Image (cartoon, helix red, strand yellow):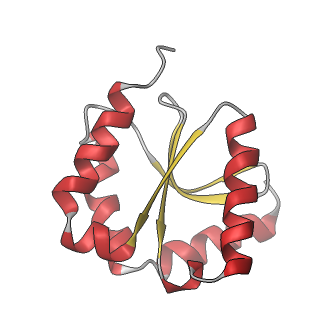
Amino acid sequence: MPAEFLERCREMRKDATDAETLLWHLLRDRQLLGFKFRRQHVIEGYITDFYCHKARLIIDVDGGGHIGEEQARYDAKRTMHLQTLGLRVIRFWNHEVLKQTDDVLEAIVAELEASPSP
């Protein structure tokens, strides 16, 4: 992995939003159905917030920076590319993670349970 990606991932971990920090606390150490998640994982030039290789699942947590037409187009292009790799992408807004945490976890569990067998 190029050094600039490693540095950017480190910065993103250090500057994580409250929502990302909360979700990481709930996903780390195989706490959710025994699935291992990675934080700020790079896939083909895209940095994902959370990635579970076994379930081929990407979880992104979006804040205000994801509002707007240009960002929506970029996010859609990114999602389509990742899906062509056989990955599934689910997105949540920061406020959903912080205020509707149980609902977010239920949605993630549903995706994990629907994951194809390795």
Q: Which sits in the foreground, 5 or 70?
A: 70
Question: Which residue occupies the extreme left position in the image?
Answer: 102
Residue 93 visible somewhere in the drawing: yes
Q: Quadrant of residue 87?
A: top right
Residue 57 higher or lower than 25, as above or below: above
Q: Which sits in the foreground, 48 or 3?
A: 48
Residue 95 higher or lower than 75, as above or below: below
- Horizontally, residue 113 falls left or right of residue 103, namely right
Question: Which residue occupies the extreme top position in the image?
Answer: 117
Residue 34 higher or lower than 108, as above or below: above
Q: Residue at 38% x, 35% y: name it.
A: 111
Residue 46 visible somewhere in the drawing: no
Q: Residue at 70% x, 44% y: name it.
A: 82
Q: Quadrant of residue 107?
A: top left
Q: Which sits in the foreground, 33 or 87?
A: 87
Q: Residue at 58% x, 78% y: name it.
A: 66
Percent x, y for residue 59? 47, 52
Percent x, y for residue 19? 34, 73
Percent x, y for residue 34? 28, 31
- Horizontally, residue 77 falls left or right of residue 29, namely right
Q: Quadrant of residue 26?
A: bottom left
Percent x, y for residue 97? 29, 67
Question: Which residue occupies the extreme front position in the image?
Answer: 69
